[in-house]
């Protein structure tokens, strides 16, 4: 198995999990939070997609899908390329209220397609390129990719957990 095939498989798992987490949910279900400071299903899938979009676009040296395809207005948000949800307050989490699953799925799929465009050409020697020297040790492209995959899969799991809690409410 080639490097790009492994990466494509990992991102496909994120895509499938994201779809299953939100499929068939309306705005109320997507906004459900187990308590006032918890993350909602909609926020979790929006956030993981923003992280993937932001980081993969940076690795690829191109503008984010969020900006290029004008996704921010569809979420009622400002088009800030740096807002990926990291450090969001409870009020900011509550403000992410997609009307339905479609907008989340469409944004994720657009990001996924651009992710595959990037990963299709990743060779093992590309993984050692330093992409962030603010850390010790500096972050390589390979470490960044593993970080994105890890973060996204964790948030997919969290979204499924919150969906399960919501569905148990009856």
Image (tube, rainbow, N blue to C red):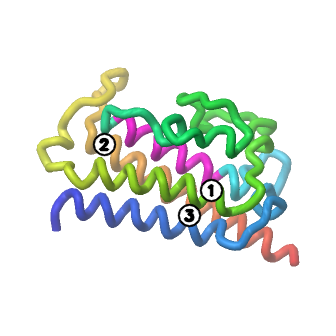
**Left or right, 130 with reference to 48:** left
Q: Which residues are magenta?
A: 44-58
Q: Position of residue 106 (x, y in %)?
A: 57, 58
Give the SS element for disc 3.
Answer: helix
Disc 1 + disc 3, Cβ < 8 Å? yes
Please determine whether, in this image, residue 81 is positioned above or below residue 161: above
In reply to whether residue 54 is colored magenta, the answer given is yes
Q: Quadrant of the N terminus?
A: bottom left
Q: Secondary structure at mark 2?
A: helix
Q: Nearer the viewer, residue 14 or 147?
A: 14
Q: Nearer the viewer, mark 1 or mark 3?
A: 1
Kindly state the secondary structure of the residue where label 1 is placed: helix
Tell which residue pokes out farthest to the right in this image: 170
Residue labelled with disc 2: 143
Residue for point 74% across, 40% down: 76
Marks 1 and 3, the one that precedes in the sequence? 3
Picture quarter containing residue 127? top left
Assess whether mark 2 and mark 3 are in contact (beta carbons under 8 angstroms). no
| Label 1 sits on residue | 104
- Residue situated in front as seen by the camera: 103 or 9: 103
């Amino acid at each position: 198995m080639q490097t790009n095939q492994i990466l494509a498989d990992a991102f496909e798992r994120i895509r499938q999990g994201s779809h299953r987490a939100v499929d068939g949910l309306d705005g109320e279900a997507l906004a459900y939070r187990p308590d006032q400071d918890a993350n909602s299903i909609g926020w979790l899938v929006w956030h993981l997609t923003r992280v993937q979009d932001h980081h993969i676009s940076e690795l690829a040296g191109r503008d984010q899908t969020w900006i290029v395809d004008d996704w921010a207005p569809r979420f009622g948000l400002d088009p800030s390329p740096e807002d990926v949800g990291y450090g969001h307050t409870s009020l900011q989490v509550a403000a992410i209220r997609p009307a339905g699953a479609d907008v989340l799925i469409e944004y994720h799929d657009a990001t996924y397609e651009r992710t595959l465009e990037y990963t299709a050409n990743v060779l093992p020697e590309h993984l050692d390129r330093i992409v962030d020297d603010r850390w010790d040790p500096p972050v390589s492209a390979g470490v960044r990719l593993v970080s994105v995959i890890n973060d996204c899969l964790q948030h997919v799991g969290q979204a499924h957990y919150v969906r399960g809690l919501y569905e148990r409410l009856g």
